[in-house]
Amino acid sequence: MRLGRTLTRRFFARDVTVVAPDLIGRVLVSTTEQGPVAVRLTEVEAYAGPLDPASHAYRRTARSEIMYGRAGHLYVYFVYGMHWCANLVTGPDGTASAVLLRAGEVVDGLPLAWARRPGARRERDLARGPAGLAAVLGLTGPDTGLDVCDPAGRLLVRAGDGHPVTVAAGPRVGVSTAADVPWRFVETGNPTVSAYRRGTRATRGSVGTVG
């Protein structure tokens, strides 16, 4: 598919609830020594920092400090002692908002994606759920701070092919705190979108869960 231009910092510096749905249909391109993998986003969630009790940045800590910085940087965190999840920092400096990247479809680098996710049952499952998405892109904790607006960087966000995308909004997955806030955005009808699961316990200080 046509990947389109690299998105600039101006794209990410907007309000998180504007950036999140606008990321649907955009393409993440991760290039490592193993080669490139490109994933077209089909599902994301918005988290509004100090205004959002479900966000890591609801309380300012050393871990969430990256979210208070400049938009267009990557924040990667570890959950359940086994999974990495990737977020893109948004908004003006100091707002600490971020978009959790929840699911997508692999559009380039399929052999490498399979090598990174050998347990996936079907192609549509490769980047389904935030853990799978981070895995196929090869993203881990040390990647926190990557500037996706740097044209020479290893992770870029491209505009995509420009085709219209139908986006639906609903409650976020796996959180109990602010569980009914409709800040999960998905491409309607896309099979890579993860299943909805409401949280069963309080998750204050969480930027979402693995789906």
Image: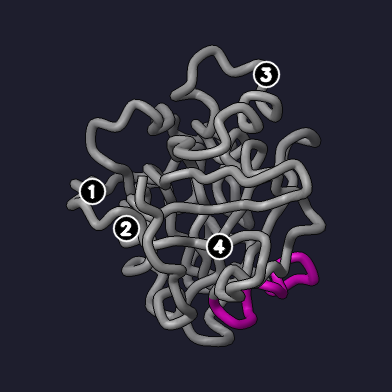
- The residue identified by callout 2 is 21
| Amino acid at the residue labelled 1 | Val
Q: CA distance from mark 1 to mark 2?
A: 7 Å
Q: Do labels 1 and 4 touch, CB within 8 Å?
A: no
Per the image, the residue denoted by label 1 is 167
Q: Secondary structure at mark 1?
A: strand
Magenta residues? 60-71
What residue would you read off at disc 3? 118
Mark 2 or mark 4, which has the lower sequence index? 2
- What is the x, y in percent for residue 49? 54, 70
Estimate the spatial distance between the alpha carbons at disc 2 and disc 3, rounded to whole Å. 30 Å
Badge nearest the viewer, 3 or 1: 3
User: On the image, numbered disc 4 is attached to which residue?
Assistant: 156
Q: Where does the image place residue 43, in percent across and percent down from the top left?
A: 40, 44
- Is the Cβ of the residue at disc 3 closer than 8 Å to that at disc 1? no
Label 2 sits on a secondary structure element that is: helix
Height in image: 150 above or below 85?
below
Q: Amino acid at mark 4?
A: Leu
